[in-house]
Amino acid sequence: MARRRRRNSGRDVSGILLLDKPAGITSNAALQEVKRLFRARKAGHTGSLDPLATGMLPICLGKATRISAFLLDADKEYLVRVKLGEVTTTADAEGEVVERHDPAGVSREALEEVLPRFRGEIEQLPPMYSAVKHKGERLYKLAREGVEVERQPRTITIHALELLDFRNPLFEIRVHCSKGTYVRTLAEDIGRALGVGAHVAGLRRTRVGPYEESGMVTLERVESLAEAGGTAALDELLLPVDTGLAQWPEVRLGADSAFYLQQGQPVMVPRAPTEGWVRIYDRDGRFLGVGEIDDDGRVAPRRLLAKRA
């Protein structure tokens, strides 16, 4: 019984915190610290950042964890500092340098010429230092053991790739990409295209789905608010659960439709979209969850948050 009480301890607090993850800690360590400060019963994040990286790490508390998968699938945006002339084991500054080349001959014009190759839909090979699984084992665990396995390329989309600064051997790019993109691999591939190799020297995530950089909160601020004002002050930092799906159309249900939908039944909604995902609200504006338009035009519940009263 004591074990069960420990597992279920914590507050039933729900919402999304846009944490500005500091460098030097893992995403899971940042998550656990936020969960502790909020005294939350349940928490999860929406896509890891490497310890080297900083920036947006949306943390979902309580019922918000039910939409975390949708944020995981959302587009992301990064500011990336890349160093030419060095290839590392991890494709970033934390790895061991395994190749060195002289980048002095690379000009801004040469870099601008290769960037178009990496815009749009491209194939990308997941790095060994990644969380992708091979026969049940994470690739990064195999990589630490010195094992390299064959990986299959994945199709990703680079929506925007903009050169912001070039001061050889360093350059900075802005990357707007689809889910599943490995920015470290992108930097490495650009370096390979230039013939001198490259790795990520600095990385900052500035956007996840509908969330922009201006809404982020530092871990230091969370800690100071927790100390000064307790959980009441912290709760004011949380965004409503449905803000993570702001790009989706919404549908509103009458009392009868809301009742049946919350029993798991698809319902017909006048003037609803004809396809895709939707946010679902009752007639009072309460967010019920997310649904998908069935082939017959009805709204089918897929992930509900509010239960029938």
Image: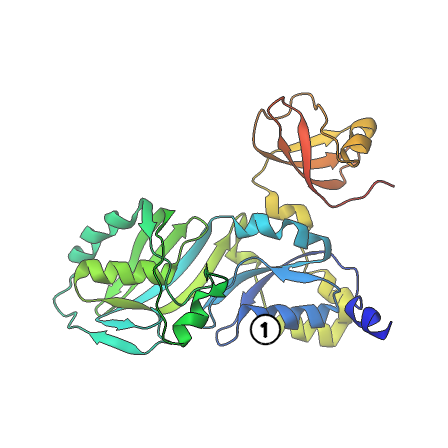
The residue that appears at 45% across and 68% down in the rendered structure is 53
Secondary element at image label 1: helix
Residue 108 in view:
no
> Which amino acid type corresponds to the residue marked 1 in the rendered image?
Ala
State the image quarter where residue 302 is shown.
top right
The residue that appears at 72% across and 65% down in the rendered structure is 234
State the image quarter where residue 79 is shown.
bottom left
Q: Residue furthest left?
A: 105
Q: Position of residue 30 (x, y in %)?
A: 59, 71
Q: Position of residue 203 (x, y in %)?
A: 40, 66
Q: Which residue is mark 1?
A: 29
Query: Which image quadrant: the N terminus?
Result: bottom right
Left or right: 282 in relation to 292: right
Left or right: 189 in relation to 92: left
Q: Residue furthest bottom?
A: 96
Q: Position of residue 27 (x, y in %)?
A: 55, 68
